[in-house]
Amino acid sequence: MSPGNLGRIESREVTARPVVVRAALALYGVTGEDAEVLIDLARGAQERGWWQNYGEVMPDWFSFYVGLEEEAATLATYESENIPGLFQTESYARTIFRWTAGEENIDQKVAARLRRQQILYRDDPVHVIAVLNEAVLLRQLGSAEEFREQLEHLAELAELPNITIQVLPFAAGGHPSMTGPYVLISFPDALDEPVVYLDNFTRGQVLEEPEHVSEYQTAHAKLQDMALAPEESLKMIRELAGSIG
């Protein structure tokens, strides 16, 4: 475990998973009934997170990210292939899961993804600054009607005061984030350093080192400069939605 992750547990920013508590107690030499009491407390603390209800379909590494997402003030993200999960409609999410994970537990997976989206509408909503590759808007997933619905939903989200969506057009050519998607997470307390989240098929990774975070912050700023302005991006999204028969 990195010092930063341990610090988030110590500062009560995130709760410690029972497996982490068990490992720490073993290191400290705490065993028997005393250890079990503390592990039970850890289980109870975890239950406060809604995502614990989706343990069968949400691996620990992604549960950790969702906990960070819930605490975030700002999410700055780049997506190259698909609509970000926080922006997906039910039908689009279902299609994504069919392609990437099959039919098993698909209803629960979709429900968990839609539940995550509540952070966009709460009293103190998270701010999202998203740059989307133009390919995201052209790669039709699901039926024409479902994809049009997704683009229309994206346009509606772009009009919310806490959401900024910019399209990176093909005409922009090469760019700093051709290595793949990412999420930059900033927290309400300025003392909590921002982190970068990356994931793939089987695991997620949180980068906390200042030099790594700085690289992604610089790349995201460059992407925003290269992308269409929010107003132009919204116009493109609406035009593409309207062109779908």
Image: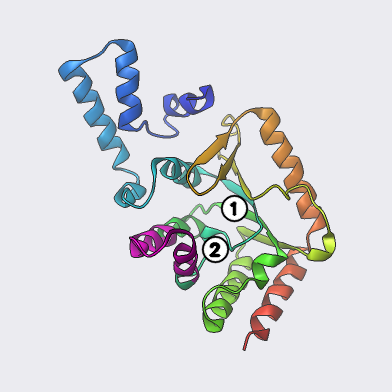
Residue at 50% x, 49% y: name it.
Answer: 201
Q: Position of residue 42 (x, y in %)?
A: 28, 31
Q: Secondary structure at mark 2?
A: helix
Name the dominant secondary structure of the magenta segment.
Answer: helix
What span is in magenta? 92-114
Disc 2 vs disc 1: which is toward the camera?
2
Is residue 27 or residue 119 the one in the foreground? 27
9 vs 178: above or below:
above
Q: Which circle's residue, 2 or 1, is located before the other in the chain?
A: 2
Q: Secondary structure at mark 1?
A: strand
| Residue 41 lies in quadrant | top left
Q: Residue farthest to the bottom?
A: 245
Neighbor class of circle 2 (other Cα within 10 Å; few <14, some 14-19, many 20+) is: many
Disc 2 target residue = 87
As shown in the figure, which amino acid type bears the numbered disc 2?
A: Phe
Neighbor class of circle 1 (other Cα within 10 Å; few <14, some 14-19, many 20+) is: some
- Label 2, label 1: how far apart the Cα atoms are: 13 Å
Q: Quadrant of the C terminus?
A: bottom right
